Amino acid sequence: MLLTITTSHEPATDLGYLLHKNPSRLHSFSLSFGQAHVFYPEATLERCTAALLLDVDPVGLVRNRKGPAGEGGTLEQYVNDRPYVASSFLSVAISRVLSSALGGRSKGRPELAATPIPLHATLSVVPCRGGERFLRRLFEPLGYSVAAEPHPLDETFPEWGASSYYTVQLSGTVRLQDLLTHIYVLIPVLDNEKHYWVGDDEVEKLLRHGANWLASHPEKEEIARRYLKYRRDLAKDALARLVDEEIPDVDIAKAVHDSEEEAVERRLNLNEQRLNTVVAALKGAGAKRVLDLGCGEGKLLRVLLEDRSFNEIVGVDVSHRTLQIAHERLRLERLPGRQRERIKLIHGSLMYRDKRLAGFDAAAVVEVIEHLDQPRLAAFERVLFEFAKPATVVVTTPNVEYNVRFDSLPAGKLRHKDHRFEWTRGQFSEWAERIAAQYAYAVRFLPVGPEDSDIGAPTQMAIFDRT
Ligand code: SAH
């Protein structure tokens, strides 16, 4: 199975930076189902092509019991199309071998990774159950021009007609991340074979990779149904959580607060003051069951755990890695049984409706909203205030007016490189007042940290109470 990706965006060899693979070398990887190789059949300044070659081992598949468990008897276990066609194995290979590019990250060319460039992908053999029309219905709404060349069932017997296999070419001006993501999700949808990855976390995976485009795709029902292999419960769950029209963003998964912002704010010991103020607001509301949304590495969770008045504490974050760190820092493994039962960490995005978030007394959203793309705040607002609807919501965010006080921060720069925005007090209160009016909450504001009469305090906080 061969996937090639070509660009003519000059210097075309920058494709190597986008894929994190040097064009002058062959890169080989062992995967559970075989070998993957990345190489560049052409690499000039005008045109560069990267190839991902998958060498699926059908015997290994049977041994590992992960492949299509041959329903037609043992022979089919060994003799099948899996080594030759684009299937979920290609998606797995993309996520393993090209994970940075799939996540939109490029160390060497970050701006280019965020820029739509002319890209052309060729998939040597794609099983299109549903035919060429379905293939087009999947890719054309995403802005690709599609060429599909059908393969005869057997060249020596033309009268047998066409097979359901096509060589597929996709061209468009898109970000490389988009192209890879679309292939990642839609190839298994086209293939429609059983693949071995269907489990509950597939819903998360689909939502994560479908961020930005699935909610508005005309075939979203069919995509979810096939991706989740007809498990109707899962497909329904996925569709229900695509908050209509809102375009989620989960790239921010990487948005772990790093030392940059902490260094800027350290002198004030702002973090501690913020946590104390949040906890005071939660206790003031009489909350017992609380959510920490975008809990990060668990600083607030630790304080909540220490206070017996909170008897159910749930931390939510979109980043797996961050949750792992929280798990370790809080030493959850070592907590005695009763304590352990009070706290739960869940992986999820605040951009999607999530039943697990409903019915709480309060939610804290501490230094999170500024990590969300502003146009997508709308999805978050609905998820929190319309669907999860805790009685009290505490939101904190930087007050940008205060930044002039941070000596180490150049003028006009935000406190952290992942912040999508930082608001003035006016902007924050306008946002919060609108939400309060729209979802029937009353809102009040509190400064956090030393307050200046002109520019306010470093952190601003809003407390919403459901009316
Ligand atoms: N509340 C923590 C962490 C703030 S950093 C603290 O005060 O220390 C922002 C956090 O929000 C990160 O951990 C990031 O992974 C998380 N995040 C960003 N976008 C998210 C989303 N869409 N859904 C859930 N969490 C998200």
Image (spheres, helix red, strand yellow):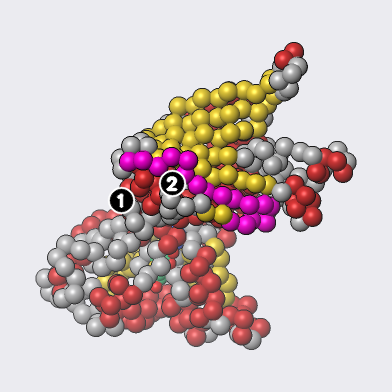
Determine whether the residue tagged by mark 2 lies in a helix, strand or loop: helix
Q: Residue at x 38, y 55 (%)?
A: 106
Q: Position of residue 15 (x, y in %)?
A: 39, 46
The quarter holding residue 418 reads bottom left
Q: Is residue 429 magenta?
A: no
Give the vertical position of 171 relative to 82 (above or below). above
Does the beta carbon at disc 2 come under 8 Å from ligand 1? no
Q: Position of residue 207 (x, y in %)?
A: 53, 49
Q: Quadrant of the C terminus?
A: bottom left
Q: Is residue 43 magenta?
A: yes
Labelled pair 2, 1 in contact (Cβ < 8 Å): no
The amino acid on which the numbered mark 1 sits, given as a three-letter code, is Glu
Determine whether the residue tagged by mark 1 lies in a helix, strand or loop: helix
Q: Residue at x 47, y 40 (%)?
A: 41
The residues tagged by marks 2 and 1 sit, at their Cα atoms, a distance apart of 12 Å
Q: Quadrant of the N terminus?
A: top right
Main structural element of the magenta stretch: helix, strand or loop? strand
Q: Position of residue 95 (x, y in %)?
A: 54, 52
Instruction: Name the residue nearer the viewer: 223 or 378.
Output: 223
| Residue corresponding to mark 1 | 111
- Residue stretch in magenta: 29-45
| Residue corresponding to mark 2 | 177
Instruction: Name the residue nearer the viewer: 413 or 371.
Output: 413
Give the vertical position of 33 relative to 155 (above or below). below
Q: Residue at x 64, y 56 (%)?
A: 31
Q: Position of residue 358 (x, y in %)?
A: 54, 60
Ligand 1 lies in quarter? bottom left
The amino acid on which the numbered mark 2 sits, given as a three-letter code, is Gln
Check the image and name the residue furthest to the front. Answer: 24
- The crowd level at tag 1 (other Cα within 10 Å; few <14, some 14-19, many 20+) is few
Instruction: Name the residue nearer the viewer: 149 or 70.
Output: 149
